Amino acid sequence: MLLPSEVEAKAIIPALRSLIAKKLVNIHNLPQQKVAEMLGITQAAVSNYIRGVRGIGVSLEGSEEAQKLADEIIKLLLKGVDQLTIMNKFHEAVVAIKAKRLMCDLHQKLEPQLDTSSCHICEQPAA
C-alpha cells in the first residue's frame, strides 16, 4: 500500500522541481549550477530534470494551476528569499496539487486495485 505522501515524495515533488528547473534554465537563462544552488540539489539532478529523465512520474506541464504555483516559487527564488519561505511555498504548492487531484491517476497506475474515484484523502486538510 502506497500512502499519498509516498506518491507525493516520489513523483509530485520531483515533477515540481523539474518544472521549476526547466523554467529557470530555459526561460530565465540561468546556468544549471546556479539553479542547483537555488533549489538545494546537485547540478546533475538539474541536468536530469532538463533532459526529462528525472521528475517524470507525473506531468505537471499541462496543468495551468501547477504552472502558476511553479511561477510563484520561481519569483521567490529569483528574489533570493530565505529557505524557509521557499520551503513553505513548495509545501503550499504540493498541497494544492494534491487537492486538485493531479496525482490520482499516477496513484491508480501504481496501485491498480485502489479505487481513486472514491478516494478523497488528498483533498482533506491535515489534522
Image: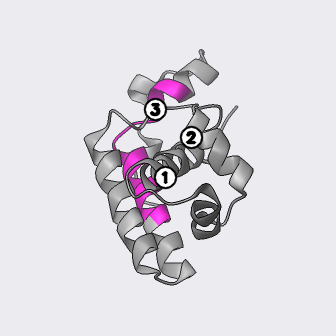
Secondary structure of the residue carrying tag 2 is helix
Three-letter amino acid code at the position of disc 1: Val
Q: Against 23, is 63 above or below?
A: above
Q: Do the residues bearing badges 2 and 1 touch, measured as CB atoms within 8 Å?
A: yes
In the rendered image, is residue 127 in sight?
Answer: no
In the rendered image, is residue 106 in sight?
Answer: yes
Secondary structure of the residue carrying tag 3 is loop
The image quadrant of residue 56 is top right
Instruction: Give the residues in magenta.
Output: 90-106
Residue for badge 1 = 25
Say the numbered circle drawn on residue 9: none
- Write the residue at 47% across / 79% down: 85
Residue 9 is covered by the magenta coloring: no
Say the numbered circle drawn on residue 50: 2
Question: Few, some or many C-alpha atoms within 10 Å of disc 2 (few <14, some 14-19, many ≥20)?
Answer: many
Give the farthest residue toward the top: 112
- Write the residue at 55% across / 29% down: 107
Find residue 86 and report its horizontal and vertical position in percent. Answer: 49, 73
- Write the residue at 43% across / 47% down: 26
